[in-house]
Image: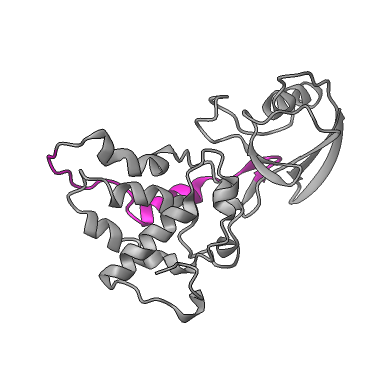
Amino acid sequence: MKVVIRRFREGKLQEENFQVKVERGTTILDLLYRIREQDPGLSFRAMCRAGICGTCAVKVNGEPKLACTTPANGHGELLIEPLDNSVYLKDLVVEHKDIFARLKRARVRLEAYKETFVKPSDMQKLWKSKDCILCGICNSVCPSLQTDREFGAPSTFTKAFGVVEDPRNANSEDSLKALLPLDIQGCVHCKNCDIFCPKGCSPEILIKLLEGKMLKKGYIQKREEDFGFLGF
């Protein structure tokens, strides 16, 4: 199979072609390791190889994917490149610091616990938030983040939902207020993040729920340009 790697070298993206043997069950990550045997200098990230750590996210034929869970067979040709909306470091490796810096800025953490009995049903609505692996795929397809770097980013709001709604959070109101500087209304609700999230976390839905909560409490006002996308 012909594989084209669009890699970041010498300050720009450059394409290189490789021929790689692919059989049934071969993943994109397997493919990258085989290409590294031909070119030991190829850089990419990978850790768990089980769709849990999120570090191996790349674009495959124009769509962001987790390399370790994406089959390589079934394609006549493959184009693999680094994620969009990212700071390129080397080859397919992009900077992840921004993801964690935004979480820190929004104080996405339980700062104070309250003792309470939590049933599994109480936690059910948090599952999508807790399933987020911070792979950055949602951010890479977010048009709001592309035009406004101050926008909180889908990954931030996805994780924040699990903190704000956690029944053990003694300061849930403060957790919600901490999101105000992140301009949650900058989300255009295009649903790109929902479409491409590899874990089915539905970031846009969680953003909509947080936005609705802020509107209800009067922390923000509905913008006329929303054109009813929120449905409130």
Q: Is residue 232 left or right of residue 154?
A: left
Q: Residue at x 61, y 54 (%)?
A: 141
Q: Residue at x 56, y 64 (%)?
A: 144
x, y (%) of residue 176?
29, 59
The residue nearer to you, when weighing 77 against 128, is 128
Q: Residue at x 60, y 62 (%)?
A: 143
x, y (%) of residue 84?
66, 52
Position of 180 relative to 89 (above/below) = below
The residue nearer to you, when weighing 88 against 144, is 144
Look at the image and name its color scheme. Answer: one colour
Q: Is residue 55 left or right of residue 43?
A: left
x, y (%) of residue 180?
35, 66
Q: Is residue 180 left or right of residue 193?
A: left
Q: Is residue 101 left or right of residue 71?
A: left
Q: Residue furthest front?
A: 231
Span of residues in magenta: 89-116
Q: Is residue 95 magenta?
A: yes
**Is there any visible trace of residue 101 in the rendered image?**
no
